[in-house]
Image (cartoon, rainbow, N blue to C red):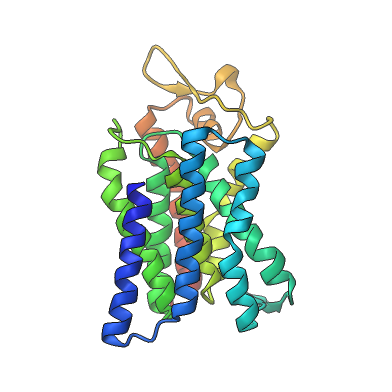
Amino acid sequence: IAIAAGFTGAVLLGLVLNTALHLQLGMTEMIAALLTVCIVAIIGILDDVFDMAQLTKTLLPLAASVPLVVVAIAAGHNSIAIPFIGAIDFGLAYPLLLIPLAVAVCSNLTNMLAGYNGLEAGLGAVMFATLSVVALMHGQAEMTILSLAMLGALLGFLPSNWFPAKVFIGDVGTFSIGAALAAAVIISDLKSAGAILVIPFVADFFLKALNGFPKSFAELGADGKLRPPKGKIRGLADLVLSVSGGLSEKALVMRLLAIEAVFALIVLALYVK
């Protein structure tokens, strides 16, 4: 909840500064993005409290995307700029299909690659630090504020969540990270940057899908190292553990952050000139 509250407070401060300093932000887009993230955060809270069915929490973020859908339809923004290819116009499929899918997919992907001290907040910090730099370089004010707001919230949370964690992130935290990522790129001209940053999460999803979405985590050996149960690779974390021959929880998290950092560098190479 602290992450969602910190993000919301920072964005609201950005809106106040926009009015006071005449920063010329797209207020409609900003409010739509904030509303979407807040709705997804509420879904996360409900899941933490009531442990909703997987299908329910997978589909509910689709409804949370409505503010962004309405804004996109009103603005007539239906295209996505893809590096080395150019802008592709998706027509009404963009606001009616791609935006809801982006919010739902990002929210759930960031909720899946999780379960280890500092992992979710650490991955989020890498992603939003990258987006903040790219957004500043390209003059994307709305994306800059959303990215810096979530980055600040995550950096404030990480000291208490790093190994050994005193506070756990919960679905409210993981869902909020994914929703903020989707919202930030949707209201910007840098949508492909977000797509690149979630590649590790997509890889984790497919590995887990092939194994029926297991809920158990790695096993802790007598030597203090984590290993995949029975050597079976059931997700990206298991893959890293298998290749490494076993790691401590802290070392595992650092390896996963390094993987995300690789994709962050790809984004910076593509977008920072």
Image side of residue 195 versus residue 209, left or right: left
Image side of residue 213 versus residue 5, left or right: right
Q: Is residue 165 above or below residue 104?
A: above
Q: Is residue 2 above or below residue 228?
A: below
Please indicate, yes or no, whether residue 151 appears anywhere in the rendered image: yes
Across and down, in percent, residue 127 comes to 43, 57
Residue furthest top as drawn: 222
Across and down, in percent, residue 185 comes to 52, 68
Work out whether residue 210 or residue 92 is closer to the camera in this orientation and state it: 92
Across and down, in percent, residue 144 comes to 39, 72
Q: Is residue 24 above or below residue 48?
A: below
What residue sits 44% from the left and 45% below the top?
172
Total numbered labels: 0
What residue sits 74% from the left and 74% below the top?
92
Across and down, in percent, residue 78 comes to 67, 78
Name the quarter where the C terminus is drawn: bottom left
Work out whether residue 108 or residue 71 is closer to the camera in this orientation and state it: 71
Work out whether residue 79 or residue 264 is closer to the camera in this orientation and state it: 79
Residue 27, by quadrant, is bottom left
Residue 161, by quadrant, is top left
What residue sits 45% from the left and 71% below the top?
31
Work out whether residue 254 or residue 19 is closer to the camera in this orientation and state it: 19
Please indicate, yes or no, whether residue 207 appears anywhere in the rendered image: no
Q: Is residue 135 above or below residue 203?
A: below
